[in-house]
Image (tube, rainbow, N blue to C red):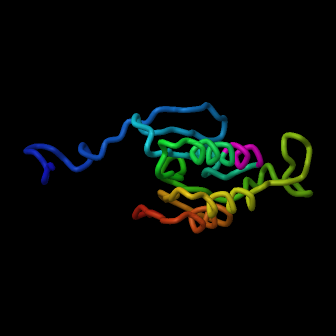
Amino acid sequence: MRQGLASGESLSQTLLVMWTAVREFEDIRYETTDEGQIAKITINRPEVRNAFRPKTVMEMLQAFDLAHEDPKVGVIILTGAGDLAFCSGGDQKVRGHAGYIGEDGIPRLNVLDLQKKIRSLPKPVVAMVAGYAIGGGHVLHIVCDLTIAADNA
């Protein structure tokens, strides 16, 4: 077993992980390590501080299902794109006066379904939080098994 760092080697070099996109989504990224043991779900809407809309929630539900069903995946990381916000909750520009409307025209956000899914997964979910975690975004990291927060969280 290797002990310590080799001469001239930094800790960040030893922790470099190569991620492979498993499936394409619009609002999120779903990736696994090359070996497939770690899945990473990234809320990929940095232009709105990773706020979620109905499409984001549906894609996250699908990604968590993929990770759950993959026998190689042992742990799931949930994070947000960029370092300004993990997730700023529901996207208020999409909400409207009557609440959130899904792409099918049915009023819903399904964020409670997402929270239940995260809590009931038999695999550990680790939130990597950098920046703001506001409202529903705060709840997302709270329902995870572990939160690792950056200095700016």
From the top left corner, tell me how far across and down residue 88 is, in percent: 63, 58
**Residue 63 left/right relative to 91:** left
From the top left corner, tell me how far across and down residue 65 is, in percent: 64, 46
Query: Which residue is rendered at x = 74% and y = 62% of the image?
Result: 112
Q: Nearer the viewer, residue 124 or 151?
A: 124
Q: Is residue 37 magenta?
A: no
Q: Nearer the viewer, residue 8 or 93?
A: 8
The mark tally for this picture is 0
The secondary structure making up most of the magenta span is helix
Query: Which residue is rendered at x = 63% and y = 66% of the image?
Result: 139
**Residue 15 left/right relative to 68:** left
Query: Which residue is rendered at x = 62% and y = 50% of the image?
Result: 50
Query: Which residue is rendered at x = 56% and y = 63% of the image?
Result: 144
From the top left corner, tell me how far across and down residue 94 is, in percent: 80, 49
Query: Hey, which residue is sitting farthest front in the picture?
Result: 71
**Residue 98 left/right relative to 94:** right
Question: Which stretch appears magenta?
Answer: 54-59
Residue 30 sits above or below residue 131 on the image: above
Residue 47 location, quadrant = top right
Residue 111 location, quadrant = bottom right
Query: Hey, which residue is sitting farthest left in the picture?
Result: 7
**Residue 91 left/right relative to 80:** right
Q: Nearer the viewer, residue 81 or 114?
A: 114
From the top left corner, tell me how far across and down residue 62 is, in percent: 68, 43
